Amino acid sequence: MSSIKGPAAAPAKFDGSALRIAIVHSRWNKTVIDALVSGTIATLKAQGVKESNIVVESVPGSFELPLACSKVISGSHVQAGASATDLLGGLTFGTSTPTTSFTSPRPVSRSSTPAPGGSGPVLANMPSQPFDAVIAIGVLIKGATMHFEYISESVSHALMRVQLDTGVPVIFGVLTALTDEQALERAGIGSGSDKGHNHGEDWGLAAVEMASNSRRWA
Ligand code: DLZ
């Protein structure tokens, strides 16, 4: 029997062509994050969102997502993130530090200009524009300690607070997986014959729907 889980189709088709969407993702559990971010961007584009209107920022871990989303929404960040065009164009990434079987926080380059001393890219100061929705993407995988519980709980509450405080939809793209395989399957890259489903696709759809409705409801 097929599963009854999952979102039903939206009641209307939404046009993302006038929307500006931010993706803020953590760099822990890179393999899964990369698949989720790619799935999200592909769906946003399929909904009509222009590549140049998709801005991607990264933070070290999921715990940093709420503050980053809040800053991105309030426009208090002065440095522009990478556009999806930049990312899809194959920017180079810095050295990664392995942390678990497939985890590695990863500094993302946002410009091809190297920083003085070769320590990384120089970020350009650019005026920020409002976002219609922000998608927070993180992957928490249960380990031997209580980190998972504390971070999952606080991050989900904090992301909810950000969207209620700002009135800007924040899409909850944080996987809270009990095993590596659970996380991989929810990014559509499971190791079995059924690779699973990339939840980034759902998050892209949710962002366009919520952004469109928020404009209509305003
Ligand atoms: C410390 C930590 C651990 C143990 N596990 C994860 C994880 O599975 N996923 C994730 O996104 N971040 C993890 N972190 C890092 C924290 O989110 C945070 O970046 C650090 O505690 C620094 O505040």
Image (cartoon, rainbow, N blue to C red):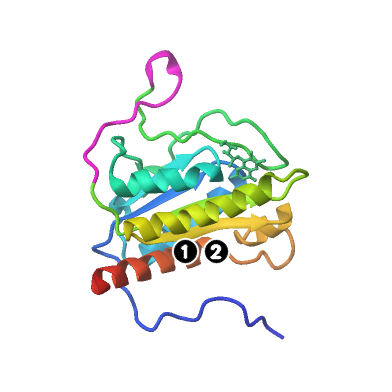
Majority secondary structure of magenta residues: loop
The residue under label 1 is which amino acid type? Answer: Trp
From the image, tell me which residue sits under label 1: 203
Identity of the residue furthest to the right in this view: 144
- Disc 2 residue crowd, few under 14, some 14–19, many 20+, Cα 10 Å: many
Residue located 73% across and 66% down the image: 193
Task: State which region is magenta.
Answer: 115-128
The quadrant in which the N terminus is found is bottom right
As helix, strand or loop, the secondary structure at mark 2 comes to helix
Percent x, y for residue 69? 40, 48
Percent x, y for residue 70? 38, 47
Is 217 rendered above or below residue 38? below
Magenta segment includes 30: no
Residue located 46% across and 34% down the image: 92
Q: Are marks 1 and 2 in contact (CB under 8 Å)?
A: yes
| Foreground pick, 215 / 45 | 215
Magenta segment includes 121: yes
Image quadrant assignment for residue 213: bottom left
Percent x, y for residue 138? 55, 50
As helix, strand or loop, the secondary structure at mark 1 comes to helix
| Foreground pick, 110 / 24 | 24
Q: Quadrant of ligand 1?
A: top right
Identity of the residue furthest to the top in this view: 117
| Foreground pick, 86 / 32 | 32
The residue under label 2 is which amino acid type? Answer: His
User: Going by the image, does 132 lie left or right of 119?
Assistant: left
The quadrant in which the C terminus is found is bottom left
Percent x, y for residue 153? 60, 54
Kindly report the distance in space between the C-alpha atoms of the residues bearing marks 1 and 2.
6 Å
From the image, tell me which residue sits under label 2: 199
Residue located 32% across and 50% down the image: 73
- Disc 1 residue crowd, few under 14, some 14–19, many 20+, Cα 10 Å: many
